[in-house]
Image (tube, rainbow, N blue to C red):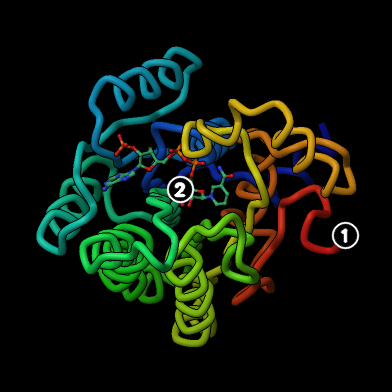
Amino acid sequence: MMSQTYLSQLFSLDGRVAVVTGGSSGIGRAIAGALARAGASVVIVARREPELAATVEELTGDGCRAAWVSADLSTRDAVRAAAEEAAAVYGEPDILVNSAGINLRPPMDEMTDDVWDLTMAVNLEAPHLLGRRFGPGMAERGYGRIIHVSSQQAHRAFVQSGVYGVSKGGLESLARSQAEAWSSRGVTSNTLVPGFVMTPLNARLSADPRKVAELAARTMVGRNGLAEDFAAAAVFLAGPGSAYVTGQSIFVDGGLSVH
Ligand SMILES: NC(=O)c1ccc[n+]([C@@H]2O[C@H](COP(=O)([O-])OP(=O)(O)OC[C@H]3O[C@@H](n4cnc5c(N)ncnc54)[C@H](OP(=O)(O)O)[C@@H]3O)[C@@H](O)[C@H]2O)c1
């Protein structure tokens, strides 16, 4: 009992409201589940309704509080509308997780303005707009946790992914600027940095056993990432115990980045 009380003081999300973009698949889905099971009421935001509904059904089936909002986060108006819709479900969020992301992968020589615009809109501008919408309210209430999901490509080029890494580099800078703006009023902003994670985003690479084995060998743990690997880190960054951790990029990558 005593250890449970102690753990609750550090990690419990009881009574908190979270908005998780990309919460219907992969890393975002695992994070949404973790936050909900740690006590938060979670609103997940993405485009595809069947995936959203299935995720929420699983969580509510487990006794969690969860709801979904379908939105395409690639335009400013849609992001703004989604933010209002999400906040209307359980109230203004205490926790914002930006996991929605795309990797369109044309290499530099084949880059187009459209790919640049879409990549920056979903991966960088949506997190910025959601932060602007929710951050000041969190600061006013004295508690907020913003968690971004970037990529090893914010730190180095990888498999000719064009401008994807540019958007993720910007995202980590955004976290630092948000941290500077709001940390003194109880709002932290941090980034989780995945290496190679076996999710639908990587369907093509994940289908090549030789590539999968090569990438696993580059980690220290000896395997590629799973969405579930992000659960505990997200609960930590969302909870009371991480109040003094802000502006950081936290690598959850099996040691890939330091090997
Ligand atoms: N998997 C990896 O190895 C890896 C590595 C580094 C970083 N990451 C990052 O981790 C995050 C999650 O990726 P994942 O691997 O979990 O991929 P995933 O399984 O493909 O999930 C991506 C999520 O983003 C949503 N999304 C995509 N475009 C959207 C849009 N325009 N509007 C609203 N929602 C949108 C998707 O739902 P809908 O399609 O239904 O909209 C889905 O829920 C991304 O930011 C990704 O860049 C992944």
Q: Position of residue 75 (x, y in %)?
A: 16, 59
Quadrant containing the N terminus in the rendered view:
top right
Residue 53 vs residue 1, the one in the foreground: 53
Report whether residue 119 is seen: yes
Question: Which residue is the site of mark 2?
Answer: 16
- Ligand 1: quadrant of the figure: top left
Q: Which residue sits furthest top?
A: 61
Q: Residues within 10 Å of mark 1 (few under 14, many from 20)?
A: few
Q: Which residue sits furthest front?
A: 109
Q: Position of residue 196 (x, y in %)?
A: 65, 45
Quadrant containing the C terminus in the rendered view:
bottom right
Give the amino acid type for the residue marked by disc 1 in the picture: His
Query: Which-is-in-front pick, marks 2 and 1?
Result: 1
Q: Position of residue 66 (x, y in %)?
A: 37, 30
Q: Measure the alpha-carbon separation of dots 2 and 1.
A: 37 Å
| Disc sitting over residue 259 in the figure | 1
